[in-house]
Amino acid sequence: MTGSLTNPDVAGPAPDTGAPVLSVRDLRVSFPSEAGRVDAVRGVDFDLYPGRTLGIVGESGSGKSVTSMAVMGLLPDYAAVSGSVTLGGRELLGLDDEAMSGVRGRDMAMIFQDPLSSLTPIFTVGGQIVEALQVHQDVAQDAAWKRAVELLDLVGIPRAAARARSFPHEFSGGMRQRVVIAMAIANDPRVIVADEPTTALDVTVQAQVLDVLRLARAETGAALIMITHDLGVVAGTADDVMVMYAGRPVETAPVDELFARPRMPYTIGLLGAVPRVDARQRTPLVPIVGNPPLLINQPPGCPFDPRCPVSLPECGEHEPALLTVAADRPDTPFTGGDPAAPHRAACIRAPEIRDGLIDGGPVYPTPELPVSPAAAIPRERRAAVLELSGLSKTFPLLKGSLFKRRVGSVHAVTEVDLDIREGETVGLVGESGCGKTTTLLEIMNLRPPERGTITVAGVDVATLRGRGEERELRRRLQMVFQDPMGALDPRLTVFDILAEPLRALGGSDGVVIGARVSELMELVGLDPEHTDRFPTAFSGGQRQRIGIARALATSPSLVVLDEPVSALDVSIQAGVINLLDELKAKLGLSYLFVAHDLSVVRHIADRVAVMYLGRIVEIGAVDEVFDDPRHPYTQALLSAIPVPDPAVERSRRRVILSGDLPSPTDDATGCRFVSRCPLHQTLDETQRARCTDEVPALTGSGGSDQHGSDQLNACHFR
Amino acid sequence: MAAEIPGPTMRGPILPGTDLGLDGPRPDDPAGSTTPARRHLTRRRLYLRRFLRNRGAVVGLVVLGLLVLFALFGSLFTPFDYTDVDFTALTAPPSPEHLFGTNGTGNDTFAQAVHGLQRSLIIAVTVSLLTTTIAAVVGAAAAYLGGRVEKLTLGFIHFLLVVPSFLILALVSQKAGGDWRVLIVVLTVFGWMLSARVVWSLSTSLREREFVQAARFMGVRPFQVVLRHLVPNIGSLLIVSFTLGVVATVMAETGLSFVGFGVQLPDVSLGTMLSDGANTIYSAPWLFYFPAGLLTLLTVSMALIGDGLRDALDPTSRSGGRVSARRAARDLESGGMA
C-alpha cells in the first residue's frame, strides 16, 4: 500500500433512492441521575440509505454516542428510550436482548473507539473473527477460518494467514482497529456504526484506517454511520452530515452543502473554531463562548441561545424545529446533493443566514489578535530562551527477573538541535513514540543530559550549582500539561494551586500572593471570586485556563505546552488557543508547543520541528514547512491530516505510509525512516545503500545550505 | 456534559470521566454565576463545613467528646481512686456507692473504668496517630523519591514485617514492667509497616500524575510535594487506617494484657479490665460489660468520625455532593426569610 494514491471515490455507490435501510424517528433517551433526569437525546430523526455514509458530528455530551448506542440496543436497562428505530422495516426498539443479539453483528455492526478494549486479549484475532462468523452463520470451522483470513487480508493485515494466529497485544493500535473492522464486516452487515473509530490513533494511521473503512463499506455495500468530533474526518468520509447539539440534531445537509453554506449559528461556530492545516494566513479562531448545557431541567427555548452571538429575544421562548431551508440563491439551481436529503436547520434565523453571513456581516464577531512586539525584530537578533544541541536520551532495555541485565537501549531522543528565540512559538510535532515528550521532560528536569547541552535563558543547565540556582531558573521556565484535570491537585483549591509556584519560588507574603492570584485569574479570563473552589467545579476549558495561569504565575520567559488543547472540545479549544496567542503578545512569552495535531501547530507556531523516531527530520518556518514540505515523512504526515472541506478532501493527493512506527531499539545505521519511506522505493541501488548506511544530516534543500532559507530537512535526496 | 450519565454511554474523544464527581454549581453556567461574592474560604473551613453536614459524624464526635470528658473528669463522681480497695464490698454489683460495682479485690470498677479508658484512649490514639503519620510520610516519600531510597525503605519494611512482632512486643513490655509509655513506643515501632506498604503502592501511581510532576517542575521541594500533594490525596486511606488503627491498638493492648504482658497492675487499662471481667462474665457480668460498653462506644464513634472525615476531605465524594445539594435547596427555601 506504499506510495501515492488518490482518494477513493467518496460518494461510493449511487444512492439507492428506494427504501432507507435504517430509519430513526423521534428517538429520545434519558437517564436518571442524582441531580435529576438527564435528557441525553431529545428527538433524533434520520434515514440511512444503503451505501451512504451519515456523519454525526458534535462535541462531547451532545448525545451522538448515546444515539448510536440506542440504535444498537446497547444502553443499560435504566435508560428510558422512546421513539422508533426500524431496520429494513423491522422495529428494533422494544426487542429484548436476545432478539437484539441476532441483529447486532449480523445486520448491524459496531466499531468502537478503543481498539484495545474491543478485542478480547486472551483469544487470537482469527479466533475472534471465527466466533463472530459462527454466532450468526452456520459455517464449519475450516471455512470460517478461511473466511477470517480473507477478511484480515481485505483490511490490509500483512501475512494474514500467519497473523490470524496472533493475539491482540501483538498488534499495534492501527492494526487492531483493522481487525475490529474485519470483525464488523464479517457477516456482511447492512449498517456499520463507527463511533470515533480513529480518535485514538495517530494521523498517518488514521488515514490508513479511514481508507480501510471506505473499502469495507464499498465491499459490503452497507450504510455507515460515522460518529466523530473531527470535522475533517466527516468532510472526507461522509455523504450526509448531522450536527448535534444538546441531544438534538440542529442541522442536517449533504456534506458539500453543509460545509459550504452552513445555516445554523452553532455549525458556523464549529467550522470557525477549527484551525486548518491548509490555511496560510493567520486569522484568529472564533471560539463559541460558554459551555454546552447540562441537559437537566432544560429551560424552554433554543438550547444554543445562551451561547449564540445572533440570538433574538424570541429564541428563548420555544425550541426551534428542524426545518428545511431554501437554497441560498433561489435563482441558481440547487446543487447541494440530492433532493432526498434536503438541507435542514433548527434556527429561526436560518433564512437570514447566507454564505455564513447574517445581514451581510459575519455571524461571529472576529476577535482581535494582538501582534507580538518581538515579531518586528528579525529572528537572528532576538535572544535565545532555549537552546538544545546534540541532546540525546536513551533508556536501557532490561531483561531478567531477579538480576536485570541490559540487553539493549531505546534511543528515545538522538542528537536534537533546537533553539527558541524570544517571543517565538516553536511547534514540536510527531506521532506518538517519536520522542517529543522525552525531549520535553529532559528540558523540564533541568539536569545535565546524557549527551549534548541544554541552555535555558542563557544558562547551561550543566553549570547549575545547588537548589537555589535551579529554582531561580525554574522561574523562567514553566509548563502547561495535557490533561486539564490530572494537572491540578484535586485536594487544593484554585487559590492554593495558583499560589503554589509563588510560594515554592520564594515569596510568602500573603497579601502579595493574594493580589497576584486575582491578577492571574483575570489574565486568563476567569472570575477571581472563584478561587476558593476546587478544580472539579470547573469545566475542561476553564481547568486548562487555570493550568495556564499557574504556569504564568512566576512570569516565565518560556512556557512549555504539552498538548494543551488536545483534551478539549473544538469550540472550547479555540478559546484557549486565542488566549495563548494573546498572552504571548501581551507578556512577550516564548512557547515550546508539543502537539500531534498539526492544524493547531500551524495556527499557533512560528516555527515547526518534525520529529521521527527521536530525530528531527525537518525544521523551518511554519508556512514554509507546511506549504512546501521536503522530507518524505513530513509530506506524508501533512497529507494524512483531514481538512474540514469536502471539496479539498476529494481533490487531495494522499501519501499513505505503510506500516506503523517501528520501535527505536537498536541504533540502526542510516536513516530511521527507511522502512516506511515512499521515496526510498523509487531510488536506485546506490542511492538506497546511502539511505541505509549513512545518517542524513539536517541540511537545506538538496543536501546543502544553498539559499538563505532556514528550512532544513534530514533526507539525502531532498 | 451531564456528569451523572453512566460510564459506557459517555465514550467520547474527550477524556471520559474528567467531569465525573462534579459536585457544585459550575461557575460558568448561568445559574451558578448568580452566587453572591464570597470572601476567600480557607480549606480548613471548607472541610469543617462539609464534616458538620454529616449527621453520623457529628454523633460520633459528640460520643467521643463525652468519652474524653468521662476519662478526664469521671474521677470527680466517685470518692474512690482506682487503686483504693474497699474491703466492705468485694465483687459487689452496681450500687449508689459503687456505680459500676467492684471487683474481687474490692477496687471500684467506675474509678477503674475512668482510669482504664484514659489509659486506653491515650495509648490507642497516640499509637494510631504515630503509626499513621510514620506510614504516610515513609510510604509516600519512598514512592516519590524512588531509586535507592525506595529500595532500602521497602527492604526495611519487609524485614520488619517478617519479624515475629508479638513476641518482641511481649518481651520488651515485660522487661519495662508494663509501663504504658514503653507500650506506646513498642506498639508504634511494630505497627506502621503494613499501612506504609499500602501507602507506598498507592503513591507509586500517584507520583505519575501530572499535578505531582507539575509541582516538581515548579520547584517545590521534594518533602513539600510529599506533604502537600501525595499525603492529602491518600487522605481517605489514612483516615480509615487511623480509625482502624485505634481499634487494632486497643485489640493489641488487650491481647498483651490478657497474656499478662501489657499494662501491669496496679495500672489499669480497658484491656486488663476486659480480661479480668471475661473470667467472671456469669458471676459478675458488670466487670465485663461496663468496660466492653465503653470500648464499643469508643470504636463506633471513631468509625463514624472516620467516615465523616473521609467524605469531608474527598472533593469527589458522592455523599458529600448529595448532602450539599439538599442543603443548597434548603438554603434557597429559607433564603426568603433570612
Image (spheres, grey):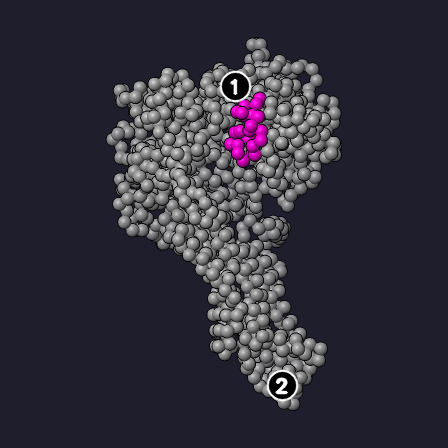
Name the chain under label 2. B
Within-10-Å neighbours for mark 2: few <14, some 14–19, many 20+:
some
x 41%, y 40%: residue: A407
Q: Which residues are magenta?
A: A153-178
* Label 1–label 2 contact, CB within 8 A: no
Within-10-Å neighbours for mark 1: few <14, some 14–19, many 20+:
many
The residue lying toward the viewer, choosing from A78 and B142, is B142
Residue A366, how many percent across, how many down?
Answer: 45, 27
Give above or below for A114 relative to B302: above
Callout 1 secondary element: helix
Residue A396, how many percent across, how many down?
Answer: 39, 41
| B249 displayed left or right of A366 | right
User: Which amino acid type is marked by label 2?
Assistant: Gly
Residue A660, how many percent across, how many down?
Answer: 47, 28
Q: Is disc 2 on the same chain as disc 1?
A: no
x 44%, y 36%: residue: A564
Residue highlighted by disc 1: A646
Residue highlighted by disc 2: B106
x 71%, y 77%: residue: B282
**Residue B323 among magenta residues:** no
Give above or below for B202 relative to A310: below
Write down the quadrant of residue A451 in the picture.
top left
Marking on residue B253: none
User: Which amino acid type is marked by label 1?
Assistant: Pro
Is residue A514 in sight in this rendering? no
The residue lying toward the viewer, choosing from B253 and A628, is B253
Name the chain under label 1. A
Callout 2 secondary element: loop
**Residue A176 among magenta residues:** yes
Is residue A669 in sight in this rendering? yes
Which quadrant of the figure contains the C terminus of chain A?
Answer: top left
| A565 displayed left or right of A75 | left
